[in-house]
């Protein structure tokens, strides 16, 4: 389960893509986790950390 800071980051990431948060997770989980997830609640804290890290690195490039 994600912590509240991770949830806030996912809200911001989804807003940047103009998607609802679960639609964002569904669309981008394969890219960031190499595994399909449908909803935010399905992510573990570790998966959230990995996703956020990859999204940050990607934003720097």
Image (cartoon, helix red, strand yellow):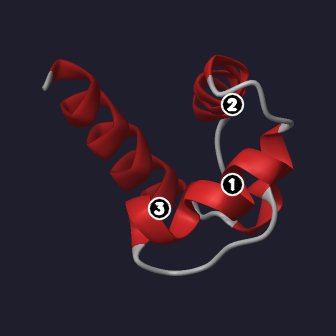
- The residue identified by callout 1 is 25
* Residue at 58%, 33% in the rendered image: 6
Specify whether 58 is left or right of 15. Answer: left
* Circle 1 residues within 10 Å: few <14, some 14–19, many ≥20: many
Q: 2 or 40: nearer the eye?
A: 40
What residue lies at 59% left-to-right and 26% top-to-bottom?
A: 13
Closer to the N terminus: mark 1 or mark 2?
A: 2
In this orientation, does residue 56 appear? yes
Q: CA distance from mark 3 to mark 1?
A: 12 Å
Query: Which residue is the site of mark 2?
Result: 14
Q: Tell me if mark 2 has few (under 14), some (14-19) or many (20+) residues whose alpha carbon lies within 10 angstroms of its own.
A: some
Quarter of image, res 39: bottom right
Q: Residue 59 in the image: x percent, y percent?
A: 28, 24
Q: Are marks 1 and 2 in contact (CB under 8 Å)?
A: yes
Q: Residue at x 65, y 63 (%)?
A: 43
User: Residue 40, position in %: x, y?
Assistant: 76, 54
Look at the image and tell me in which quarter the C terminus lies. Answer: top left
Image height of 11 relative to 53, above or below: above
4 horizontally vs 29: left or right:
right
Q: Residue at x 81, y 51 (%)?
A: 23
Quadrant of the rendered structure where residue 3 is? top right
Report, in whole angstroms, how far the alpha carbon at label 1 lies from the one at label 2. 8 Å
Residue 18, placed above or below residue 41: above
Labels 3, 1: front one = 1
Q: Mark 3: few, some, or many residues within 10 Å (few <14, many ≥20)?
A: some
Q: Secondary structure at mark 3?
A: helix
Give the structural element (helix, strand or loop) at label 2: helix
Residue 47's mark? 3
Work out whether mark 3 precedes mark 1 in sequence or the reverse, and give the earlier one.
Answer: 1
> Relative to 16, does residue 48 appear above or below in the rendering?
below
Label 1 residue SS: helix
Q: Residue 28's x, y, as percent?
A: 56, 56
């Amino acid at each position: 389960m994600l912590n509240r800071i991770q949830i806030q980051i996912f809200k911001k990431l989804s807003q940047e893509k103009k998607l609802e948060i679960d639609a964002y997770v569904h669309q981008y989980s394969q890219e960031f986790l190499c595994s399909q997830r449908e909803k935010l609640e399905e992510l573990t804290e570790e998966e959230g950390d990995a996703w956020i890290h990859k999204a940050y690195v990607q934003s720097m490039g």
